Amino acid sequence: MAYNVAATIKVMPEGPETDLEELKANLKASMPTGSEINNIIEEPIGFGIKAIMVTALLNDDEGGTEPIEEAFSNISGVESVMVIDVGRLG
């Protein structure tokens, strides 16, 4: 599928004890239809906490990143979800 938007989404785990590998797997599994994860990295925040930075590809449809934000927010172990950047591809 050809996507025309890339969004960087910062996912904060509930705490340093959160299993980040399990969290990343759950993020990948929760992606709504019509979107996919292009990249996923850990970013140290401090005090042993790491944020998960997700680069998601999607189309510029009504609702934008909201379905992804909602899906991520409903995952156990996620404290917060914030869109950092949205840009057009090509």
Image: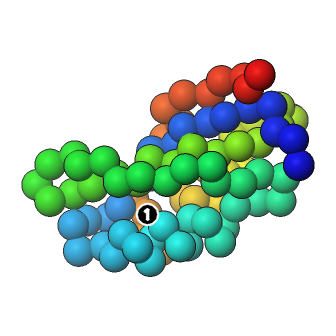
37 left or right, relative to 16: right
Type of the residue with mark 1: Val
Name the colouring of the figure: rainbow
- Quadrant that contains the C terminus: top right
Residue 14 to residue 68: above or below: below
For the point 63% across and 49% down, the residue is: 38
Nearer to the camera, 61 or 73: 61
For the point 44% across and 77% down, the residue is: 22
8 left or right, relative to 43: right
Q: Position of residue 86 (x, y in %)?
A: 62, 27
Q: Which residue is outermost to the left?
A: 47
On the question of residue 81 being in view, the answer is no
Residue 67 to residue 48: above or below: above
Residue 14 to residue 83: above or below: below
- Tell me the quarter of the picture where residue 72 sits: bottom right
Nearer to the camera, 27 or 70: 27
Q: Residues within 10 Å of mark 1 (few under 14, many from 20)?
A: some
- Tell me the quarter of the picture where residue 87 sits: top right
13 left or right, relative to 75: left
Q: Which residue is outermost to the front?
A: 90
On the question of residue 39 being in view, the answer is yes
For the point 54% across and 38% down, the residue is: 8
Element assignment for label 1:
strand
Q: Position of residue 69 (x, y in %)?
A: 61, 50
For label 1, the residue is 78
Total number of numbered labels? 1
